[in-house]
Amino acid sequence: MIYSLYPLTLDVQGRSLTYKGCKLQCDERTLMLFQLLIESYPEPLETSALLEKLWPNTVVSSWSVTRLISDARKLLKDAGMEESVIQTLHGRGYRLEPELAAKLQSHVQDSNTGAVRVPKTRPLAWAALAASLLVAAIVQYVGQSPQGLLIGEPANVKGRILWVDDHPENNTAEIARLRDANIAVYTTLSTEEALMLLSMYRYDAVISDMGRSDDSLAGLKLVESLRQSGDQTPFFLYTILPSDAQRQLVLEHGAQGVAVDETALFALLERVNWGIKSTAPREDERNTPLTKTDTSN
């Protein structure tokens, strides 16, 4: 299937996005984002739906969607596109800009006859069926989820870790090992996102890299901000070949340790009192589906 929204063209089968015929360099998740926006129009996509579709079986924060949308907009702007492509509907999610969607045409590729232009249709019956199935799935999931869990968290979780790294793909082995030990791992990409999450939810430990983006001391600044705000969540720096000065600074600012490999990291994590912070919400938190604790035990 090829979707044309001049000057954009999304080739679903070929996994490419072009602007005025020029192929844009974008990852698979960005391509999936545009495909979902096109195929759901005119209905908006909520953040929860995007998280489920774009990060399946992965626990990430809603900020990951915000970052992806921002990066997609920047990609098109850098390519020279001045028109807005993704519309933000506050409280409802995201959808294609109506002016762009009005140009939407789909092409079904045929190996014998080539591309055949087919008008794109949106039968209300199909839309209603899809909505019904989505609602049913959500109801079933919520009904089966213990009240004390964050969305996507395994049952009987031992503890929670917030992992701050702008390249989370580098930590897949460590994260898998933690989850096998029944420890929920939540990943985020920046210091700002981490501080916001820590202000809303409780974690038993924070793991952070040292440098992120253009800030070579991002990890140091994160632990410094936490301690200055009175947050004493155990903090571990996970980085390659830190200097002696960096090690000393991080420890002086309140970190519990520095690890350079998986073995050292898990040795440090053995000191964590799992479940101490996870069992109660912050005093100023309300009982929401995200933070409500299970008091049945």
Image (cartoon, rainbow, N blue to C red):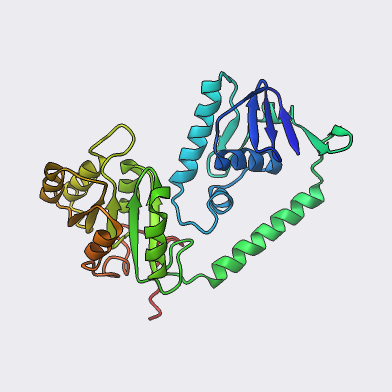
Comparing 19 with 70, the one in front is: 19
Comparing 37 with 213, the one in front is: 213
Q: Is residue 297 left or right of residue 4?
A: left
**Residue 119, horizontal then vertical, whole percent:** 84, 34
**Residue 66, horizontal then vertical, whole percent:** 47, 40
Q: Quadrant of residue 232?
A: bottom left
The quadrant in which the C terminus is found is: bottom left
User: Outermost residue, right direction?
Assistant: 113
- The residue positioned 64% from the left and 27% from the top of the image is 18
- In this view of the protein, can residue 283 be seen by the observer? no
Q: Is residue 295 left or right of residue 271?
A: right
**Residue 243, horizontal then vertical, whole percent:** 16, 43
- In this view of the protein, can residue 61 be seen by the observer? yes
The quadrant in which the N terminus is found is: top right
Comparing 30 with 24, the one in front is: 24
Q: Quadrant of residue 40?
A: top right
Q: Is residue 31 left or right of residue 165?
A: right
| Above or below for 243 versus 128 | above
| Above or below for 185 versus 191 | below
- The residue positioned 68% from the left and 33% from the top of the image is 10
| Above or below for 12 versus 203 | above
**Residue 203, horizontal then vertical, whole percent:** 31, 60
- The residue positioned 33% from the left and 47% from the top of the image is 194
Q: How many marks?
A: 0
Q: Quadrant of residue 156?
A: bottom left
